[in-house]
DNA sequence: ACCTGAACACCGTTCAAGT
DNA sequence: ACCTGAACACCGTTCAAGT
């Protein structure tokens, strides 16, 4: 009986949640391209077609991953603070979740409005933008750009290489630096000066701070006269 | 002799340029996912392995596409105008090329520094940002965010569906609108108000204008005190 | 230099069948 | 309800061989 439970722990029942969790773990470990139906099935000790009972196709599985991330976002309570401060707080909460899952962050880009938790976040952002004085159309576009900014911030972070161990990542960074530093100092002086920053992210907090603030300040800048 | 030339026109010699051009055309017509080694070979009346003489692997072919786009960018001449106006002009020139090739715009995101024309554009942007007072590290990060913004602007344009004919695209838009308009008016009032804007791009010039200005104003907003 | 043929190790997905 | 087996139509890529 005890042995039976131990075996069951190794090969539990297949569920949507377990598959999604397995996919996220696999993506963080070996990259999103390692997430295939066949590989997921193998890791779960099951036949590939077993997954098709739980998800109609692979795209719906990816949608499940996006939904999982979005449901992990802890929205800050609405306050009386100015709209831009609240917007920063909401986006920061979303950014925190994306940063925790850089390998699958990109999946969220096109799937926010396909899940309940995503809709709740979008509604909140739209409300703040309307408060700021934007039209419904502008608010829609700006919210989309905000999401794109956060996703890009995470998934394009310099020096990020998901699914590679430290040694090969550092070698990659070293070679990228070297190739940039080999550029002509006359023709590409600024590229040379920025070479290190392109190859790796020297200061993570500052990097994300700047990226988030870039968007917030942009929204303030394009805000119609009140 | 004349017949021979006519046949040659159908099946010319394979070159890197021809392959890249064929790939871009195919991507615009049927989407980037239709661009496979095997399909490209088929369209050129050649065996898949023939392409491997011209490109070591598929990623280098995609790199070739990105380079082609970047080499099409016509940079405006440097002037005495303020840095932000010049930056807007440079990004607008890049945006124009991306807009002409929405299906492959995303390829540029991670490949600017892999080609000469990309480096020239990056150098120019970095120079303007340094002029504005940013550090080499900040300039690197901001230039990356600028590129991300432009690429997202093009490849995530609402209602864009590359490789679908008008009928199915409009049906897609109609259904997206309908699904958003079915949301609860109490819980998602702003989503309802923005539903149309999320489903299609009502006014293209305004959309791109806002997206570009969002970035420029963002950079102005995070600019250090002078 | 430029291309072919055959083969390998993968994909997502369908469909009928098992329990 | 939940999973399997066999099959289909694809991928990218290697390697030896042809001209």
Image: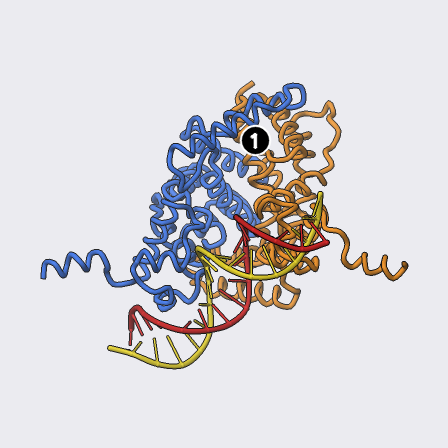
Chain colours: A orange, B blue, C red, D yellow
Q: Quadrant of residue A171?
A: bottom right
Q: Quadrant of residue A164?
A: bottom right
Q: Return the x and y of residue B111 as percentages of the image width and height.
A: 46, 55
Q: Residue at x 62, y 31 (%)?
A: A122
Q: Residue at x 60, y 36 (%)?
A: A112
Q: What is the quadrant of the C terminus of chain A in the image?
A: top right
Q: Residue at x 50, y 25 (%)?
A: B196
Q: Nearer the viewer, residue A197 or A108?
A: A108
B77 shown above or below A11: above
Q: Residue at x 68, y 42 (%)?
A: A68
Q: Quadrant of residue B16?
A: bottom left
Q: Nearer the viewer, residue A27 or A150?
A: A27
SS under mark 1: helix
Is any atom of residue A14 visible in this view? yes
Is any atom of residue B79 visible in this view? no
Left or right, residue A134 beside residue A65: left
Left or right, residue B127 beside residue B18: right
Tell me the subunit letter for badge 1: A
B42 shown above or below B32: below
Q: Which residue is mark 1?
A: A219
Left or right, residue A94 beside residue B19: right
Q: Label 1 neighbourhood size at 10 Å, few (<14), some (14-19), many (20+)? A: many
Q: Return the x and y of residue B125 as percentages of the image width and height.
A: 45, 47
Q: Return the x and y of residue A173 as percentages of the image width and height.
A: 58, 63
Q: Nearer the viewer, residue B89 or A67?
A: A67
């Amino acid at each position: 009986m005890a042995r039976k439970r131990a075996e069951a722990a190794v090969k539990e029942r297949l569920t949507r949640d377990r598959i999604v969790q397995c996919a996220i773990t696999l993506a963080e470990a070996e990259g999103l391209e390692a997430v295939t139906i066949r590989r997921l099935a193998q890791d779960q000790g099951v036949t590939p077609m077993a997954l098709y009972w739980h998800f109609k196709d692979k795209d719906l599985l990816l949608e499940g991953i996006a939904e999982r991330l979005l449901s992990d976002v802890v929205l800050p309570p609405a306050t009386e603070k100015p709209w831009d401060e609240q917007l920063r707080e909401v986006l920061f909460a979303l950014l925190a979740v994306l940063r925790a899952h850089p390998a699958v962050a990109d999946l969220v880009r096109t799937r926010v409005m396909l899940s309940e938790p995503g809709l709740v976040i979008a509604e909140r952002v739209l409300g703040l933008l309307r408060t700021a004085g934007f039209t419904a159309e502008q608010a829609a576009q700006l919210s989309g750009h905000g999401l794109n900014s956060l996703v890009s911030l995470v998934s394009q972070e310099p020096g990020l290489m998901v699914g590679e161990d430290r040694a090969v990542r550092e070698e990659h960074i070293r070679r990228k630096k070297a190739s940039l530093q080999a550029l002509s100092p006359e023709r590409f002086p600024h590229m040379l000066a920025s070479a290190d920053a392109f190859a790796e992210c020297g200061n993570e907090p500052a990097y994300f701070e700047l990226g988030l603030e870039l968007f917030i300040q942009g929204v303030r800048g394009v805000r119609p006269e009140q």
